[in-house]
């Protein structure tokens, strides 16, 4: 099995970041995470962020960047990524009012243009899924599959959120295999079959506490050429800093220990 790097999507710690961005990064590094994926930068200038990450011995994987910013502020976003040493710009989510078929017809054009611009500047552009990409059809095809069939692999790669894939009723291992070679980043999460809270669409829990076949998923990811396994928990019942420690321990015991 190939050795993948282990990162954290910082959205899991959004409240902690608001209170103390730098201190939270220090805590993440202390747990053993090798890299972080941003969704904002806490108003920290790019050069200072690079200095902090270098001090902590952590890598910047990339950043989740809202579609509006990808369209209107792409050069600045790319400049920040390059300064902190990140390779990936990721479109993470679309608001509900932007998900109908007509909207997706335009998104396919816009995402292709963004991808080409990223490629020209040496940054890889990825799309991160939730569940709605599997329930919306365009010309009879699931939007998720249309994205990656209609936009060349040179300009758009996959950041697969494996939790949302299984939540959508799709075999996660089969989908990892389907996108092998185009899948540098994989969001690893776990969830309960029956939510404890009717207000939650998906009840995410620490790795190993839910229903996903995580061992099979990790092996498939390694075989598919995934570079980074990125831990993410959409919401935490336990204190989030404890949750990310529990999930890292699962990764340590079930994956990383074999490389010692």
Image (tube, helix red, strand yellow):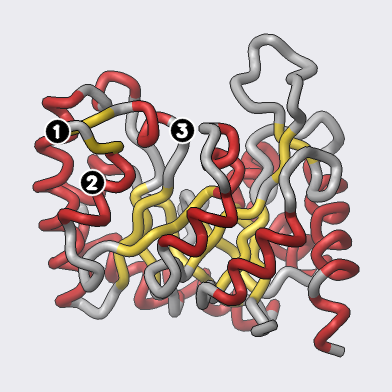
Marks 3, 2: nearer the viewer? 2
Is label 2 in a helix, a strand or a loop?
A: helix
Residue 36, labelled with which disc?
Answer: none
Are discs 3 and 2 less than 8 Å apart at CB? Answer: no
Q: Residues within 10 Å of mark 2 (few under 14, many from 20)?
A: some
Outermost residue to the bottom: 260
SS at circle 3: loop
107 vs 101, nearest the viewer: 101
| Residue 1 vertical position relative to residue 96 in the rendered view, above or below | below
Q: Which residue is mark 3?
A: 131
Q: Residue at x 35, y 52 (%)?
A: 127
Give the alpha-carbon distance from disc 1 to disc 2, as whole Å: 9 Å
Q: Which percent across, then down, holds residue 260?
A: 87, 89
What residue is rendered at 74% in x and 14% in y? 197
Per the model, the C-alpha gap separating discs 3 and 2 is 15 Å
Cβ atoms at labels 1 and 2 below 8 Å apart: yes
The mark nearer the N terminus, 1 or 3, is 3
In front of the other: 88 or 136: 136
Place residue 199 in its image quadrant: top right
Q: Residues within 10 Å of mark 1 (few under 14, many from 20)?
A: few
Residue at label 1? Answer: 139
Relative image position of residue 65 (x, y in whole percent): 36, 50
Q: Which residue is mark 2?
A: 146
| Tag 1–tag 3 contact (CB < 8 Å) | no
**CA–CA distance between discs 1 and 3?**
18 Å
The residue that appears at 34% across and 49% down in the rendered structure is 91
Q: Is residue 126 above or below residue 103?
A: below
Viewer-side residue, 91 vs 181 = 181
Mark 3 or mark 2: which comes first in sequence?
3
Where is residue 106 shown, x and y percent of the image?
10, 37
What kind of element bears circle 1?
A: loop
Q: Earlier in the sequence, mark 1 or mark 2?
A: 1
């Amino acid at each position: 099995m190939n050795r993948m790097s282990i990162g954290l999507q910082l959205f899991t710690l959004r409240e902690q970041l608001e209170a103390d961005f730098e201190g939270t990064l220090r805590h993440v590094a202390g747990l053993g995470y090798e890299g972080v994926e941003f969704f904002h930068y806490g108003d920290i200038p790019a050069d200072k962020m690079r200095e902090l990450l270098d001090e902590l011995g952590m890598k910047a994987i990339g950043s989740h960047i809202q579609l509006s910013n990808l369209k209107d502020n792409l050069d600045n976003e790319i400049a920040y990524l390059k300064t902190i040493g990140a390779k990936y710009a990721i479109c993470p989510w679309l608001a509900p009012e932007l998900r109908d078929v007509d909207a997706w017809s335009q998104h396919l054009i816009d995402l292709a243009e963004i991808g080409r611009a990223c490629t020209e500047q040496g940054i890889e552009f990825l799309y991160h899924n939730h569940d709605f990409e599997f329930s919306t059809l365009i010309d009879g095809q699931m939007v998720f599959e249309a994205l990656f069939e209609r936009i060349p692999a040179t300009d758009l790669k996959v950041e697969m959120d494996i939790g949302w894939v299984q939540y959508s009723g799709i075999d996660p291992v089969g989908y990892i295999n389907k996108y092998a070679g185009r899948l540098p980043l994989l969001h690893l999460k776990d969830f309960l079959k029956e939510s404890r809270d009717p207000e939650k669409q998906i009840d995410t829990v620490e790795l190993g506490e839910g229903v996903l076949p995580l061992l099979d998923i990790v092996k498939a990811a390694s075989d598919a050429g995934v570079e980074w396994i990125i831990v993410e928990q959409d919401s935490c019942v336990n204190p989030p800093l404890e949750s990310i420690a529990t999930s890292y321990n699962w990764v340590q015991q079930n994956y990383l220990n074999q490389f010692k």
